Amino acid sequence: MKQKFILALLVISGLLNAQEKQEDYNFSLEEAIAYALEHNYQSQNASKDVEAAKKKKWETTASGLPQINAGADYQHNFVLQKSIIPAEFFGGNPGEFVEVAFGTKHTMNAYGNISQLIFDGSYLVGLQSAKVYLQISENAKEKTDLEIRELVINSYGNVLLARESVSILESNKSSIEKTLFETNETFQNGLTEEEDVEQLQITLSQINSSLANAERNEIIALNMLKYVLGIDLEESITLKDELENLTQENVDLTVSQGSFSVENSIDYKIEQNNLESNRLLLKLEKSKALPSLSANYNFGYNAFNDQFKFFTTEQKWLNYSYLGVNLTVPLFSSLARSARTQQARIAFEQSKTSLKSTEQKLLLDYQKAKSDYELSIELYGTNKDNLQLAERIEKKQSVKFKEGISSSFEYTEAQRQLYSAQQNYLQSMIDVINKKTALDKITNTK
């Protein structure tokens, strides 16, 4: 009895742990965007790049602050180095020499060093460069977030598009199967031609093929969305929004009527970073012609003994200390510094041209994105009207075909027109969403 009770507890515990591990992913579009900005693989790396840039900035700053080092040296002289000196120094005969060993078998030195940079033009430029480097990382993170936002919207919309396609094709399949059954019954009774049945069979076969492809596309689109969100492909997710509602939310003609400032574009900001980087590079090369000044203070203790007694009270330690100042003045480099400065100046001028080019391209891209967005809204309205017309035409042809007034060719043609109108309408909805997203990306609208 006791063993059964323990076994039941283990089973219940396992079930509870399994439920705890299972995530419940249920997203609206905005929730999916927020989740991706935190969990997407590229977004995570971009955030780490910003953190690394902050540490790099402090590393550059710290290089000009006091540096303190300490150490100890120990040397055991197995055989002391000998020198030759005249023997007459010790009362010997002139012209003779004796061997003399200088030093002790054991020596130890404990020391400390404090250094401080007083002036260096390269260091001052480095501080400014570290700040720009951080801005570059932050702008790269912002660009990554914009790209991820676009990817999420496109992927989210593709899933909804695939699901709507599957739903419409299933409805068309059900309708054509019913018509085919009724037509086949009519043919069996000799009231219609076999060609009518065959024509409907061809249409049904095409729908089955399209439906199978749409179902595969739905799986691929859903997995792509999971990847963009940073979710394992084995997990299941639920989407709250509907394609029609998202399309209506993105139909906003006032957006394309607003003004556009290139300064707000992330691409322009990145190009400005490049310009500033090259300006500082030029400044750095110029600063190398300036003198640099640093100071250092050294102190320590020496100990000598023929026996290893450095850690006893008998050992005598001899202290020393000194203060040093180092001044370096560049005088002549055979015009090497001048050549490097000219190269930096050329790169700086090139970055100015690139900034102007980026500005003009952004204005052109904005005009195209604005035009594409306005066109997508127009096509959305047109395709919506065309779908309603195609539905009415198909309905009329269906009635005529069943009553024997219309041929199978005319009915099939009305069906194809309806299917084409359905796909055009679905595509126009996703185009509105995607074109609005592309316009928001250029204007840096979130």
Image (cartoon, helix red, strand yellow):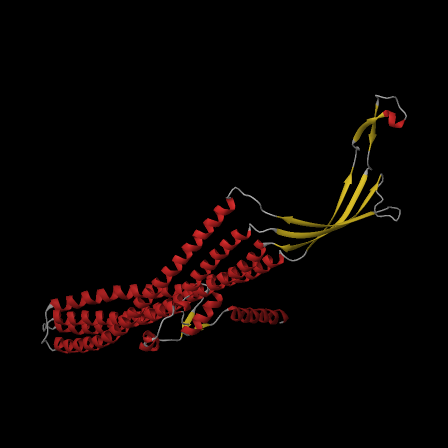
Q: In the image, residue 277 lies at what x, y percent?
A: 48, 57
Residue 88 falls in image quadrant? top right
In the rendered image, the quadrant that contains the N terminus is bottom right
Q: In the image, residue 78 lies at what x, y percent?
A: 79, 34
Please tell me whether residue 230 is drawn above or below residue 248 in the rendered image: above
Image side of residue 347 versus residue 183, left or right: right
Image side of residue 316 versus residue 202, left or right: right
Please tell me whether residue 338 is drawn above or below residue 178 in the rendered image: above
Residue 308 falls in image quadrant? top right
Image side of residue 125 versus residue 246, left or right: right
Q: In the image, residue 374 lies at what x, y percent?
A: 28, 72
In the rendered image, the quadrant that contains the C terminus is bottom left
Residue 166 visible from this viewpoint: no
Residue 61 visible from this viewpoint: yes
Please tell me whether residue 76 is drawn above or below residue 82 in the rendered image: below
Please tell me whether residue 160 is drawn above or below residue 80 in the rendered image: below
Q: Residue at x 43, y 68 (%)?
A: 236
